[in-house]
Image (cartoon, rainbow, N blue to C red):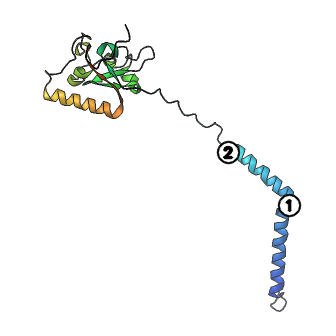
Amino acid sequence: MSVADAPPAAEVWNTTLTIVYLNSATIATPINLVLFSLFALLVYLRFRPSTPAANLPTAPPPTVFRIFTPPQLLPFDGQNNKPVYLAVRGKIFDVSPGRNFYGPGGPYANFAGRDASRGLACGSFDAEMLTEDLKGPLDRLEDLGQEEMEALRGWEERFGEKYLVVGKLVPVGHAEAEPDETK
């Protein structure tokens, strides 16, 4: 085909527009729109998440700060679905999130429901580190050295960062002590 035989530019342009118009007219037919919608629906059903939205866990019941005596603290050892509390230097921590360590069968289980100050300070988890007379005075830790007191402060700081303080430990008969509910 020679240049002289070529159609004028306007004629080529009109032919191109006609082809584009015809193609878009055939694509946008109602049946094609319905088929495309069904295809989109099938793709959505195939790739949507199959599991329902995860339910958030229920919040634990609110914990009220209270004053404990050693006998009142003793039942909070993680048995019978009770929380696990332990005392360090007069502060009572709810260590229930660490139940594997502080609850029944855990390596620190003998501290559950007790004042763990002396045992933590001395790095001993033996039962001899616990106060035997729960109705007597609290262990004042006066015989501990500087290094042991520093270790105890480290434990107290770690508990304070990780666990909620739920109470204060006072001796039996103290003015702040709440009446014993077990009587």
The quadrant in which the C terminus is found is top left
Q: Could you give the CA–CA distance between mark 2 and mark 1, rounded to whole angstroms?
A: 27 Å
Q: Mark 1 is on which residue type?
A: Thr
- Name the residue nearer the viewer: 139 or 108: 139
Q: Quadrant of residue 142?
A: top left
* 57 vs 116: above or below: below
Q: Which residue is mark 2?
A: 47
Task: Please give the name of the residue rendered at 18% of the width and 28% of the height, measured from the top-left corner.
Answer: 149
* 27 vs 42: above or below: below
Secondary element at image label 1: loop
Q: Residues within 10 Å of mark 2 (few under 14, many from 20)?
A: few
The quadrant in which the N terminus is found is bottom right
* 76 vs 160: above or below: above
Residue 82 in the image, given as x and y percentages of width and height? 43, 17
How many marks overall? 2
Q: Mark 2 is on which residue type?
A: Phe
Q: Which numbered marker is on residue 29?
A: 1
Task: Please give the name of the residue rendered at 79% of the width and 54% of the height, measured from the top-left corner.
Answer: 36
Task: Please give the name of the residue rendered at 81% of the width and 89% of the height, measured from the top-left corner.
Answer: 2
Q: Quadrant of residue 55?
A: top right
Residue 56 in the image, given as x and y percentages of width and height? 54, 34
Residue 157 in the image, given as x and y percentages of width and height? 27, 33
Q: Residues within 10 Å of mark 1 (few under 14, many from 20)?
A: few
Task: Please give the name of the residue rendered at 85% of the width and 61% of the height, measured from the top-left corner.
Answer: 29
Q: Quadrant of residue 140?
A: top left
Is 52 on the left-hand or right-hand side of 147? Answer: right
Query: In the rendered structure, which disc, 2 or 1, sits on the residue that comes first in sequence?
Result: 1
Is 62 on the left-hand or right-hand side of 10? Answer: left
